[in-house]
Amino acid sequence: MRYEVFALNGILAVIGFIATSSFMLGLGVFGVVHLVSAYLCQRDPYIFHIFERRISKRGAVANITFWGARSYSP
């Protein structure tokens, strides 16, 4: 499992604990997310690399025809 996924798992568990003040819920969130991510890593070791690359790619911007390039403001 990638370190980034483990850190994100910990962050989600802490947020769950802070939001509900229940240690068991934070521990439960950590366990469930850890099991799911471990299963995904077993199926494909690069699944989170693929997910990260897919998220990092930008889509087309609506004003590309006007400017001829990607631009977020006129």
Image (cartoon, rainbow, N blue to C red):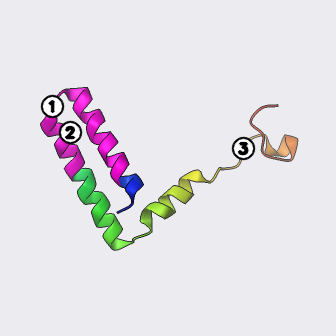
Q: Amino acid at mark 3?
A: Val
Q: Which residues are magenta?
A: 6-31
Q: Earlier in the sequence, mark 1 or mark 3?
A: 1
Q: Residue under circle 1?
A: 22
Q: Is residue 65 left or right of residue 40?
A: right
Mark 1 closeness class: few <14, some 14–19, many ≥20 residues within 10 Å: few
Q: Amino acid at mark 2?
A: Gly
Q: Residue under circle 3?
A: 61
Label 1, label 2: how many angstroms apart (C-alpha)? 7 Å
Give percent across and percent down for residue 21.
18, 27
Give percent across and percent down for residue 25.
17, 38
Q: Residue under circle 2?
A: 26
Residue 21, magenta (yes or no): yes
Label 2, label 3: how many angstroms apart (C-alpha)? 39 Å
Q: For mark 2, give the secondary structure.
A: helix
Q: On the rendered image, what quadrant is the N terminus found in?
A: bottom left
Q: Residue at x 28, y 65 (%)?
A: 39
Residue 15, magenta (yes or no): yes
Q: Residue at x 26, y 55 (%)?
A: 34
